[in-house]
């Protein structure tokens, strides 16, 4: 049955890409705020609604977790994780770094992930075979071992100690590593899988942002944290993905962000069940 779900996922992501491309070009796109630095667009709602309807029609017993309408993972069986637009702030400001992220879990463990960059028409995907691909071609993580040559993607939120942001940047800079904060964690993780970034670190990510990209990175050979084992499906968790060549040193360089407790021990409720609330 997983093959049928992967096929549906590919169809839905393709449709979502068309919706996102049209909306990104629309000067009249409606944007509202869920809180400081947390925007939502009518496109987020449209894509998640489309996907929920398609999943419900094809697989009514499956669980769904989405950024805009919430949900919970099933302990057994299949669960879908939907981030209709990851990088909504970029999307709203007509910046080109955003994506659509979709993941499928079986018995609470990922078996498939799709991350689409609709503007570049790049689909990063991995299925139950454990092979990460970009538009059908297998991809692998970067092989750079010189710490002075690496680029680490970073993500931050208000769900943890704000001072941690500065400590991470300071420690990376002192170690000689470059960093980028690009604004869409799922796409950054896909870029780790493709070797464009050497690593991605974020002290707390919600499940719809994290699971698909982490699965892609792991399938491409990255060292990743056990997000699900850390309780990420229930309350979010830290995210770490790095090429094997630099993972140990990167962990040694970073402050205790991976074990740092977020200020909020649940998924951000402004983003989970926003409409229902």
Image (cartoon, rainbow, N blue to C red):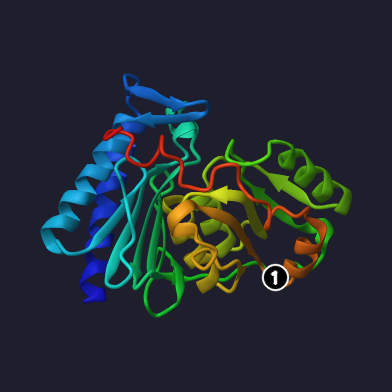
Image coordinates for residue 209, horizontal then vertical, percent: 46, 50
Q: What residue is drawn where x is 23% and y is 58%?
A: 11
Outermost residue on the left side: it is 57
Residue 194 seen in the current view: no
Horizontal arrangement in the rendering, residue 50 relative to residue 189 (left or right): left
Q: Can you name the residue that lies furthest to the top here?
A: 28
Mark 1 lies on residue: 143
The N terminus: image quadrant: bottom left
Is residue 213 something that shows in the picture?
yes
* Residue at image point 27% right, 61% down: 9
Mark 1 burial class by Cα count in 10 Å: few <14, some 14-19, many 20+: few
x and y percentages locating residue 26 in the rendered image: 32, 25
Residue 226 is situated, as x and y percent measured from the top left of the image, at 56, 68
Question: Looking at the rendering, in which quadrant would you find the C terminus?
Answer: top left
Q: Residue furthest bottom?
A: 129
Quarter of the view holding residue 192: bottom right
In depth, the one of 180 and 67 nearer the eye is 67
Residue at left offset 13%, top offset 62%: 58
**Label 1 SS:** loop
Q: Position of residue 158 (x, y in %)?
A: 59, 35
Residue at 42% over, 24% down: 33
| Figure disc tally | 1
The part of the image, by quadrant, that contains residue 200 is bottom right
Q: Is residue 147 left or right of residue 103?
A: right
Against 73, is 83 above or below?
above
Note whether 73 is above or below 32 in the view shown: below
């Amino acid at each position: 049955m997983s093959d049928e779900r992967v096929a549906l996922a590919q169809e839905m992501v393709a449709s979502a890409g068309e919706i996102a491309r049209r909306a990104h070009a629309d000067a009249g796109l409606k944007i509202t705020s869920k809180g400081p630095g947390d925007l939502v667009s009518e496109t987020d709602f449209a894509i998640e609604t489309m996907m929920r309807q398609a999943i419900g029609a094809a697989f009514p017993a499956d669980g769904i977790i989405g950024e805009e309408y919430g949900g919970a993972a099933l302990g057994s069986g299949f669960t879908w994780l939907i981030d209709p637009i990851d990088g909504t702030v970029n999307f709203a400001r007509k910046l080109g770094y955003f994506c659509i992220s979709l993941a499928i879990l079986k018995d609470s463990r990922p078996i498939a992930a799709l991350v689409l960059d609709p503007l570049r028409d790049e689909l990063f995907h991995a299925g139950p075979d454990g092979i990460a691909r970009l538009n059908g071609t297998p991809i692998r993580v970067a092989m750079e071992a010189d710490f002075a040559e690496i680029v680490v993607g970073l993500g931050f939120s208000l769900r943890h100690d704000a001072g941690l942001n500065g400590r991470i940047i300071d420690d990376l800079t002192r170690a000689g590593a470059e960093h980028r904060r690009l604004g869409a964690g799922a796409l950054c993780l896909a870029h780790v899988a493709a070797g464009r970034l050497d690593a991605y670190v974020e002290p707390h990510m919600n499940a719809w942002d994290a699971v698909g990209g982490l699965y892609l990175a792991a399938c491409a050979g990255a060292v990743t944290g056990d997000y699900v084992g850390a309780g990420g499906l229930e309350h979010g968790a830290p995210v770490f993905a790095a090429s094997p060549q630099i993972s140990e040193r990167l962990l040694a360089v970073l402050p205790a962000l991976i074990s740092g407790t977020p200020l909020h021990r649940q998924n951000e409720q402004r983003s989970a069940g926003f409409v229902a609330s």
